[in-house]
Image (cartoon, grey):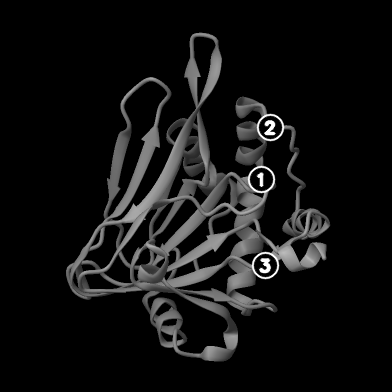
Amino acid sequence: MKIPNSASFAPCAESLLSDGFCLLPQVLAAVECRDFIAQYDTEQIYRSTIDMARYNFGRGQYRYFDTPLPEHIAHLRTRFYELLVEPARVWAQRVKVDDNYPATFKAFEASQKRRKQTKPTPLILRYTSGDYNCLHQDISGEHYFPYQMIFFLSQAGRDFEGGELVLTQQRPRMQTIPHVIKPDRGDCVIIASKYHPCAGKRGSYRTTFRHGVGKITDGERYSLGIIFHNYADPAASE
């Protein structure tokens, strides 16, 4: 893993605050990508498996990791949270959210637990020919982190064709802006989880971000999602 330090991450943080997304090249090595893919069928490390067609989410399959999270997943979540917490605080000021995100992921996770958001959200996704992912947001519960990460484990043009990452930015009373991204294997794209603030004449206004995956025309595509907030657990309130 090639996790940037605060100084080298600064341009990405600026892009997040100006555009709502950024790309970090070659965070994962090829061997690490292959290891993630090889673990896909290891049943005991997952809490649930979702058939996307069953819920009209698209076509394909994804699996949520169970707790305790695998060490490398937990490490990515903890280290990148530390890099993203300052942009998250600026984001909160601009969208007028009363949430001063704590400095460490451990403290953030503790605040999630107090809100009964305890279901872990890191996941791995598999698409084969004809599969796609509808535009969506990964939000469940009132308390969420404003950014999330997508790691690309397969090589476009060799392992699969099609399957572009699609982001949409819906602006109030204006047409939606589409963003189409074609990362390489090992790259990480960080995106706005729900809202992105844009500068207006009377201060910042909210634009709504959604993300999805274009149709796979051939081959097999894997990706890893790191979401910092957990999902609400209805059982925890009983």
Could you say which is closer to the camera, residue 19 or residue 132? 132
Residue 184 in the image: x percent, y percent? 30, 62
| Mark closest to the chain's N terminus, 3 or 1 | 1
| Dot label at residue 85 | 1
Question: In the picture provided, is 125 more to the left or to the right than 73?
Answer: left
Type of amino acid under label 3: Lys
Secondary structure of the residue carrying tag 1 is: helix
Q: Are marks 2 and 3 in contact (CB under 8 Å)?
A: no
Residue 66 is drawn in which quadrant? bottom right
Which residue position holds label 3? 119
Above or below for 36 versus 137 = below
Above or below for 68 versus 173 = below
Secondary structure of the residue carrying tag 3 is: strand
| Label 1: how many Cα within 10 Å (few below 14, some 14–19, many 20+) | many
> Mark 1 to mark 2: distance in Å?
14 Å
| Dot label at residue 123 | none
Type of amino acid under label 1: Val
Nearer the observer: mark 1 or 2; the answer is: 2
| Mark closest to the chain's N terminus, 1 or 2 | 1
Which residue position holds label 2? 97
Above or below for 227 versus 16 = below
Residue 217 in the image: x percent, y percent? 16, 67
The residue lying at 65 percent from left, 48 percent from top is: 144
> Mark 2 to mark 3: distance in Å?
23 Å
Could you say which is closer to the camera, residue 9 or residue 130? 130
Residue 106 in the image: x percent, y percent? 77, 60
Q: Are marks 3 and 1 in contact (CB under 8 Å)?
A: no
The residue lying at 68 percent from left, 77 percent from top is: 67
Q: Which quadrant, please, contains the C terminus?
A: bottom right
| Mark closest to the chain's N terminus, 2 or 3 | 2
